[in-house]
Image: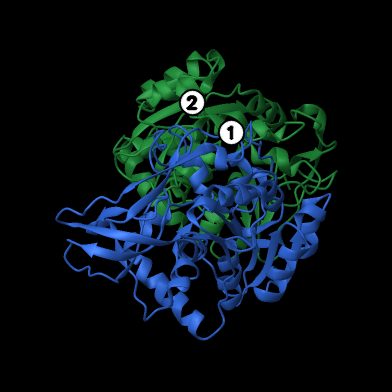
Chain colours: A blue, B green
Amino acid sequence: MPTNHRLLLAARPAGIPGPANFTADALPARAPVPGEVLLETLYLSIDPAMRSWMSEGAGYQQGIPLGEVMRGGGIGSVLESRAEGFSPGDLVQARLGWQTHPTIAGRYLQKLDLALGTVEDWIGPLGLSAVTAWFGLRDIGGLRPNDRVLVSAAAGGVGQIAVQIARIEGCRVAGIAGGPEKCAFVARELGAGAVIDYKAEQDLSAAIARACPEGVDLYFDNVGGPTLDAALAHLRPGARVVLCGRISQTLAAEPYGIRNLGRLAAAHGRMQGFLVFNYHERYDEARAWLAARRRDGSLRQRLHVLEGLAQAPVGLGMLFRGENTGKLVVRV
Amino acid sequence: MPTNHRLLLAARPAGIPGPANFTADALPARAPVPGEVLLETLYLSIDPAMRSWMSEGAGYQQGIPLGEVMRGGGIGSVLESRAEGFSPGDLVQARLGWQTHPTIAGRYLQKLDLALGTVEDWIGPLGLSAVTAWFGLRDIGGLRPNDRVLVSAAAGGVGQIAVQIARIEGCRVAGIAGGPEKCAFVARELGAGAVIDYKAEQDLSAAIARACPEGVDLYFDNVGGPTLDAALAHLRPGARVVLCGRISQTLAAEPYGIRNLGRLAAAHGRMQGFLVFNYHERYDEARAWLAARRRDGSLRQRLHVLEGLAQAPVGLGMLFRGENTGKLVVRV
């Protein structure tokens, strides 16, 4: 059997997570029993939600017990199958965990349809971040042509897809990102009509007023806290606020107090959170749309690729320091 | 012509509004021109939104200019009609203003259908507060049988109807009100299964946890601020929060900072404001339902009646001090 290199959660993080929170081990991969598949991990996705899994019982899922393999989604290749429908060489998507050779029940695997896109497409513009952007904008946000759309963390994994979906659907899109490099990416590569560099702005609300002079019909929020508060002040009547992520609050000692809810009420607007997993049965619908836009060249994706499993904890830290440029993945 | 006694906005309020903000005058009623009707005011409704109309350009409508008749809805009787479809003695609902004998264009009047209920029913359980509760719970809140429903200002004009609609629809209802008298009303007369006296509680969140041990599926918010924040902490997955009123914030020097939005996101819940006026074309639908429940005795209404136009400013102050017990109206 091949050696399974693993990263185990060793210590719960106090602030930004990193290598100190993990220990590595290596042991022979476990042979699959009937119904299971032995995989080789190709890519792991690094996502903000992982930080909450590292805490005890926080967030929408149970925390990972200390000493267990770090939870995380990715793409693997089947090495050995005792599960119906899977053969060696098949590419699958699953919650593989931070390990090189997981053994997983076939019912937890989703086979990649390579007619829709490449392996890199599946980790990127067909992956869960992209699907999240799609359902968030359309089902939660009720995206309509000509909407004035504002997206925070617009250069991030979900944000960059959200900006592009809104643009492709005929909306006027403004993005918020940190630093000139990310802002240039959002404007030039993603096609946002206006960009706000939050690191360069003293007054984010005034910057939003300049970027969205007519106000905001749909705010796609990936950060929460003061950014959400500033965006609320500019809601147009009937506005929708999609609560997708709140990376600014994950590490906050005290939750930020949102002061502008009165504007949501006055604008008879809607603010809504969602779990992409609840759309599980409709992922294909999103992927068909995304794959078509990928094929016609209108949908771009920038991956920020780190090399080797050992880089996964480093990547998690980069995410919370805003150092990644694009959807962050580890090539294992 | 009869004498039209009026109350004019004389000074914008700094805090709780009252008699000092108004001056009275009296002049002959204006004879109706073609298309208009001369009315005698029977009842005026006293509502929290009026406070925002008294400020300059605040809220969802333009502020009332100083020196003009105070804006307000009510019920009147037609004295003289030059508008098609109205005859002396007809009872109508309209934004009459704080005056005894308004002259108003017929197109702004809605004739009362006395087959649905009495004049007192029309100011109460068929009035705009009741219609607001109905659309708020059903269209915005997506009320479902067995929902665990929490209503703030549960003894108030909108709240008391919201509690009863939810109960009649088969929900478990908890109400928040101030003081033992109001709480007894909410429990005994309105039929709430649990009541929270916010004035007697040190820790409102703990009190909500006791009243709603399984959490809250639908929070109907009439007060905003700390009460909203406390309720958010108890949202169940898929919860809905209806932003109907925010009386706690109308007079606040600084808006309260809401800290528990993270729970809304984690519960993939929805928070939504609304303008009842946007449902104008569907008022009949709400009134048909409310009238049927009024007839079968399942829907009760407590009016708090003040006598005489001069009491209207006093009533406005009572509303913001929480001194009214029931839907507050002035019999003119």
Residue at the spot 80% in from the left edge and 33% down from the top edge = B13
The single residue placed furthest to the left in the displayed view is: A34
Whether marks 1 and 2 lie on the same chain: yes
State the image coordinates of residue B243 (x, y, percent, origin top left): 55, 43
Q: Which residue is mark 1?
A: B223
Q: Which residue is mark 2?
A: B176
State the image coordinates of residue A46 (x, y, percent, origin top left): 51, 54
Q: Amino acid at mark 2?
A: Ile
In which quarter of the view is residue B54 placed?
Answer: top right
In which quarter of the view is residue B9 placed?
Answer: top right
- Along the horizontal axis of the image, is B100 left or right of A30? right
The answer for how far apart the CA atoms under marks 1 and 2 are is: 10 Å
Is B126 in front, or is A330? A330
Question: Mark 1 or mark 2, which has the lower sequence index?
Answer: 2
In which quarter of the view is residue B254 placed?
Answer: top right
The answer to whether mark 1 and mark 2 are in CB contact below 8 A is: yes
Where, quadrant-wise, is the N terminus of chain A in this rendering?
bottom left
Is B80 in front, or is B237? B237
- Along the horizontal axis of the image, is A325 left or right of B244? right
Q: Amino acid at mark 1?
A: Val
Residue at the spot 73% in from the left edge and 48% down from the top edge = B1
State the image coordinates of residue A93 (x, y, percent, origin top left): 36, 63
State the image coordinates of residue B80 (x, y, percent, origin top left): 63, 54
